[in-house]
């Protein structure tokens, strides 16, 4: 099997690292060689965060080059636009419609770009956008945005749903498991 690449992009504090662990564990359960790499940037100050997950029969490096991602899961619209050049032709983006102001916008030095989803659509990229924040709130906690997005990504994957659920059960702390299983299901059903 050719090596496949998933990128998870977002803002510090959105749970990108937990999402990458859940994905990695599911892929390992399927028998793939899996490499995960995390790039933090200014993650503790709400800066851009990207996680690479690569899997296949044998994976040499965890890094995804521009034009090399099969899937990009964007936890926020501006991050989707920022990383779009990493999607390979024929790849797919899963995008949370939520907008989180970066520091230049917060301090008034810049404006949040308008029409991001229209720009992405005009680029010809295949994507599915959902309001993961509302679904996370429906599940019981706004911090479950990451797992809502994983649910949607899982629906489009070749991996069986039960494998994803097993990975959630083995990765998420017990006290948050019920909430995250509900969040996953809400994303999966979209």
Image: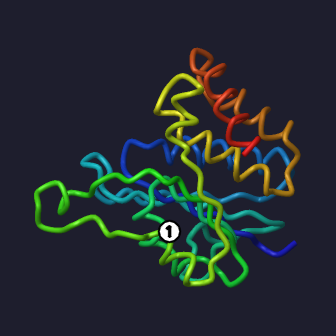
- Residue nearest the viewer, comparing 5 with 56: 5
The picture places residue 36, in percent across and down from the top left corner, at 60, 57
Choose between 167 and 128: the one closer to the eye.
Answer: 128
Q: Say whether residue 108 is left or right of residue 3.
A: left
Dot 1 surroundings within 10 Å: few (below 14), some, or many (20 or more)? some
Q: What's the residue at 24%, 48% (across, down)?
A: 45
In the rendered view, tell whether residue 160 sits above or below residue 62.
above
**Which residue is pictured at 46% across the width and 32% down the height?**
142
Nearest the eye: 172 or 83: 83
Identify the image's colour scheme: rainbow, by chain, secondary structure or one colour.
rainbow
Q: Is residue 176 above or below residue 158?
A: above
Task: Give the answer, above or below, for where 1 lies relative to 17.
Answer: below
Residue 16 in the image: x percent, y percent? Answer: 50, 48
Instruction: Residue under label 1, please give it.
Output: 117
Q: Quadrant of residue 71?
A: bottom right
Q: Residue at the spot x=19%, y=60% of the render?
A: 105
Viewed as shown, does residue 47 lie left or right of 154? Answer: left
Residue 101: percent from left, percent from top: 28, 55
Q: Residue at x 54, y 22 (%)?
A: 140
Name the secondary structure under disc 1.
helix
| Whole-percent x, y for residue 168 in the image | 70, 33
């Amino acid at each position: 099997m050719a090596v496949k690449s998933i990128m998870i992009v977002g803002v510090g504090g959105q749970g990108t690292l937990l999402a990458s662990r859940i994905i990695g564990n599911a892929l390992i359960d399927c028998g793939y060689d899996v490499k995960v790499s995390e790039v933090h940037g200014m993650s503790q100050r709400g800066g851009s965060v990207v996680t690479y997950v690569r899997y296949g029969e044998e994976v040499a490096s965890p890094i995804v080059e521009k034009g090399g991602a099969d899937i990009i899961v964007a936890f926020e619209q501006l991050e989707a636009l920022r990383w779009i050049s990493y999607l390979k032709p024929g790849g797919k983006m899963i995008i949370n419609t939520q907008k989180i102001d970066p520091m230049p916008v917060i301090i008034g030095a810049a404006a949040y770009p308008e029409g991001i989803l229209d720009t992405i659509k005009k680029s010809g990229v295949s994507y599915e956008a959902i309001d993961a924040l509302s679904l996370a709130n429906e599940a019981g906690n706004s911090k479950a945005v990451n797992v809502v997005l994983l649910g949607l990504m899982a629906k489009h994957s070749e991996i069986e749903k039960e494998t994803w659920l097993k990975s959630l059960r083995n990765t998420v702390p017990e006290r948050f498991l019920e909430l995250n299983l509900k969040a996953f299901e809400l994303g999966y059903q979209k």
